[in-house]
Every structure is written in structure tokens, then in C-alpha cells.
Image: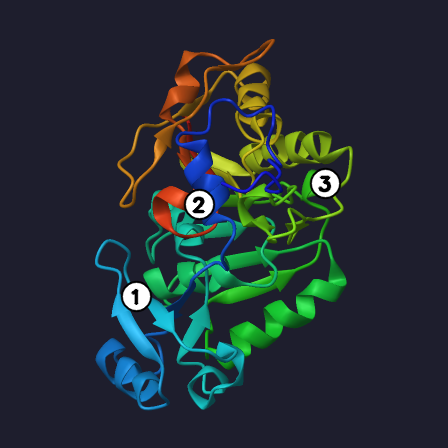
């Protein structure tokens, strides 16, 4: 390994095979796409996409997902404009699968824009349920609405409300909180050692995340299920946030579930922070182990 290759995570001694992660970060993230089965069948969509010269390899473990090999931007293809697929990181599918949505559920996607997970939830429910796609950032709603329209989805209602103050008029059977985060799971390293895809970030991210997770849990119906996720590796934005919820709400419980792709247990402690033994039921996804964006996913239930 080159001496110029700097470690952007010097304090993260919990990362498995850290040298392998740093080497993995030297190359671009691979491209994945998710088929939209609402317009036409998955088989016909694959045929249409492949006809444009995109080489697809199906990901057997994750419904509707394919690894895409193409040297141009997927968003420039005719099949994309027709709404046949959504370019999406493989690991970002996991929060939706952990949520286990059904057409009978009232679903809230608290931080929905630009719509990758929202539209996947619609696909998993065959566009027959009711999904409230919320995002406080009005500018990001343009992309969310465009993706919903492009993919021909009718089960989604869009709102723009601060998540920390989301109204509690109704209770949802499923709530997804893909919280704003530092995005460390997306980092790439240039040969010079510079960190690419690095967000400027905000110092108050954990405070924002804690406000979001508590309000989202309060919007959850008794016996409902919530998933908290981020695309960062930082324990203070992941396990610490979930531990905060468990302390604030006695009827919150982390659920065990089987991940379809390789994952590691959540951390029960980090340096001088004690999160609790139950945090081991959360899942960590490292870029070099799944060949995609790093993620954190915790499935949480609400007792009646």
C-alpha cells in the first residue's frame, strides 16, 4: 500500500480488514440499478436495458437489483427516461427489505428525497399501498416528484415537513428513517490520498438524527416496525442514535432479522461510549465486503 494513501478513519479500529477497505476505496463505486416492474415485466425491462448496450448481472439476494456495467451515465439512457429502472446502490435496498412493507401497510418515509427507497417500497408493495414520502428540503422534492412521475407510481403522497416536528395525527404501520448523515460509506480515495465524495457535514448531525428517530418512533403505530439507517460508518450517528431512542422510549426494541447480503453486528460500545448489548442486532455494511456503499441498518419495533 502506498505511503501516500491516507486513512480517513484513523479512530475506527472496529472496521474489519481495514487495509482492504482502503484499497477498495481507490476505485470508483460499482454501478447498480433497480428494475421498475410497474410498467412492464422484469424480464422485458432487462431486455430493453440490455439492448442499449448495458451489461447486467442479476443480484440474486436482492429483488429487482442488477449490477450494471456501462461506461456512460445511466441517467442518459432511453430506458431510464422511460422509467424502466432506478440507479441505486445495492446496500440502500436493505433498509426497505428490513422494513418488510406490504400493500396493507400505511408507510412513512421520513427523509424520502430523491426517492430511491421510496420508489423501491412502492415496487415491493406492487404500487398498491399508501406511502407518505416526506422531506423537509423543498429543493430536493423536485427530484423526488420527478422520479415518482417517471416511474409511473400512484401509491405515493409527497409532503414537506420538518421531520422533528412531523404531525402525529395518524400512526403508521411502517416508518423508514434514512437520516441525513456524514456519508462516510460513500468515501473514495484518490491516488494522491485525497478523500473524494466527502460531505462538508454539520457538527449537529447526531442531534438532528436523535430528533428524527424519536419523532419517527412516535409516529409509529403500536406493534409497528421502524427502520433507522444511514450511509455512514460513524458510531455516533448510528448506534448512539438508536441507543438514545431506547433510553427515551421504553416500548422500543431492536429486532433481530436476517440480512440478504454480508453484514457485521452493530457495536455495543465505542471508546468511552456504551450503547448496550441489544445494539448487536443492528447491521453494519462495509464497502469492501459488499462492493457497494457502506451502510448501517437497525430494525426497531414498538410494543402495543
Q: Read off the residue under disc 2.
A: 287
Badge count: 3
Image quadrant assignment for residue 115: bottom right
Helix, strand or loop under label 1:
loop
Residue 218 appearing in the image: yes
Neighbours of disc 3 within 10 Å: few (<14), some (14-19), many (20+): few
What residue lies at 56% left-to-right and 50% top-to-bottom? 186
Q: Position of residue 4 (x, y in %)?
A: 62, 42
Q: Position of residue 20 (x, y in %)?
A: 42, 39
Task: Name the disc covering residue 158, or none.
Answer: none
Q: Is residue 287 positioned above or below 120 on the image? A: above
Q: Read off the residue under disc 3.
A: 165
Mark 2 touches mark 1? (CB < 8 Å): no
Residue nearest the observer in this picture, 247 or 206: 206
Q: CA distance from mark 1 to mark 3?
A: 34 Å
Residue 40 appearing in the image: no
Mark 1 touches mark 3? (CB < 8 Å): no
Q: CA distance from mark 2 to mark 3?
A: 33 Å
Q: Image check: 104 left or right of 171?
A: left
**Quadrant where the C terminus lies?**
top left
The label nearer to you, 2 versus 3, is 2
Q: Position of residue 94 (x, y in %)?
A: 38, 48
N-terminal label among 1 and 3: 1
Q: Image check: 178 left or right of 14?
A: right
Q: Is residue 92 positioned above or below 86 on the image? A: above
Helix, strand or loop under label 3:
helix
Neighbours of disc 1 within 10 Å: few (<14), some (14-19), many (20+): many
Q: Read off the residue under disc 1.
A: 64
What residue lies at 71% left-to-right and 52% top-to-bottom? 161
What residue lies at 59% left-to-right and 26% top-to-bottom? 241
N-terminal label among 2 and 3: 3
Residue nearest the observer in this picture, 303 or 237: 237
Amino acid at each position: 500500500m502506498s505511503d501516500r494513501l491516507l486513512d480517513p478513519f484513523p479512530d475506527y479500529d472496529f472496521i474489519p480488514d481495514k487495509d482492504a477497505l482502503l484499497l477498495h476505496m481507490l476505485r470508483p463505486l460499482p454501478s447498480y440499478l433497480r428494475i421498475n416492474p410497474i410498467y412492464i415485466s422484469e424480464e422485458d425491462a432487462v431486455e430493453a436495458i440490455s439492448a442499449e448496450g448495458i451489461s447486467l448481472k442479476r443480484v440474486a439476494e436482492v429483488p429487482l437489483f442488477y449490477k450494471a456495467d456501462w461506461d456512460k451515465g445511466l441517467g442518459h439512457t432511453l430506458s431510464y427516461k422511460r422509467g424502466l429502472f432506478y440507479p441505486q446502490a445495492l446496500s440502500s435496498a436493505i433498509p426497505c427489505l428490513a422494513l418488510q412493507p406490504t400493500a396493507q401497510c400505511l408507510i412513512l418515509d421520513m427523509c424520502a428525497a430523491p426517492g430511491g427507497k421510496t420508489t423501491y417500497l412502492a415496487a415491493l408493495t406492487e404500487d398498491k399501498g399508501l406511502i407518505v414520502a416526506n422531506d423537509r428540503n423543498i429543493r430536493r422534492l423536485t427530484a423526488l416528484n420527478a422520479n415518482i412521475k417517471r416511474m409511473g407510481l400512484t401509491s405515493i403522497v409527497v409532503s414537506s415537513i420538518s421531520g422533528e416536528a412531523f404531525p402525529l395525527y395518524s400512526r403508521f404501520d411502517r416508518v423508514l428513517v434514512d437520516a441525513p448523515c456524514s456519508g462516510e460509506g460513500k468515501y473514495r480515495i484518490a491516488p494522491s490520498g485525497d478523500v473524494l465524495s466527502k460531505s462538508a457535514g454539520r457538527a449537529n448531525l447526531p442531534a438532528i438524527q436523535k430528533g428524527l428517530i424519536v419523532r419517527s418512533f412516535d409516529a409509529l403505530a403500536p406493534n409497528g416496525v421502524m427502520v433507522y439507517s444511514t450511509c455512514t460508518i460513524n458510531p455516533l450517528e448510528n448506534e448512539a442514535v438508536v441507543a438514545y431512542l431506547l433510553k427515551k422510549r421504553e416500548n422500543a426494541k431492536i429486532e433481530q432479522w436476517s440480512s440478504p447480503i454480508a453484514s457485521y453486528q452493530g457495536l455495543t460500545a465505542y471508546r468511552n461510549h456504551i450503547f448496550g448489548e441489544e445494539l448487536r442486532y443492528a447491521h453494519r455494511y462495509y464497502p469492501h465486503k459488499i462492493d457497494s456503499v457502506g451502510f448501517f441498518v437497525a430494525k426497531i419495533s414498538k410494543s402495543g
